[in-house]
Image (cartoon, rainbow, N blue to C red):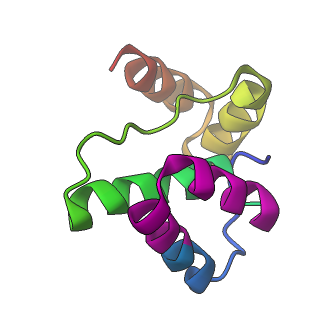
Amino acid sequence: MRYEDITNDLYLLQRGVEKIVKYGMATFTQYANEMGLSYCDRNRIIAKARMAYGLTGLKEMPCPPELMQERLDYYVSIYGNQKAISMLEEIDRA
């Protein structure tokens, strides 16, 4: 699994929302693995299911340890080194 992949088509994300709403987390996880959805895509789908469908029991996934460096690299590429580190520290405290 990658940290972020902005090349996925939106219909894959919408199908993920439908899977999680209709069949639950286990089926959604299987779908996400088969489609190669990134960590961020999975959390986007979970967040949409929570907000749009009222599934407040769903929790976003914490960042897996093997993706921590890729997450840092992604934030540094957007915000620069110091701001990225402070943002990630704040995110991890929440």
Q: Depth check: give the residue in front, 73 or 42.
A: 42
Vertically, is 87 above or below 76? above
Judge by depth and name the residue closer to the eye, 70 or 38: 38
Above or below, comparing residue 66 to residue 38 in the picture: above
- The answer to whether residue 18 is magenta is yes
Q: How many marks?
A: 0
Q: Quadrant of residue 71?
A: top right
Q: Position of residue 23 (x, y in %)?
A: 48, 61
Residue 88 point in image, percent of width and height = 50, 26
Residue at image position (36%, 54%) is: 47
Magenta residues, dominant SS class: helix
Query: Which quadrant of the view contains residue 11?
Result: bottom right
Q: Which residues are magenta?
A: 16-35
The quadrant of the image that shows the C terminus is top left
Q: Residue at x 68, y 46 (%)?
A: 77
State the residue at coordinates (46%, 17%).
Answer: 89
How far from the left and from the top, in percent, is residue 55?
26, 52
Specify whether 52 is left or right of 47: left
* Residue at the (51%, 35%) spot, across then down: 61
The reply, left or right, for residue 30 in relation to residue 90 is: right
How far across and down, in percent of the image, does residue 21 sit?
A: 39, 64
Residue 70 magenta? no
Image vertical order of residue 23 relative to residue 9, above or below: above
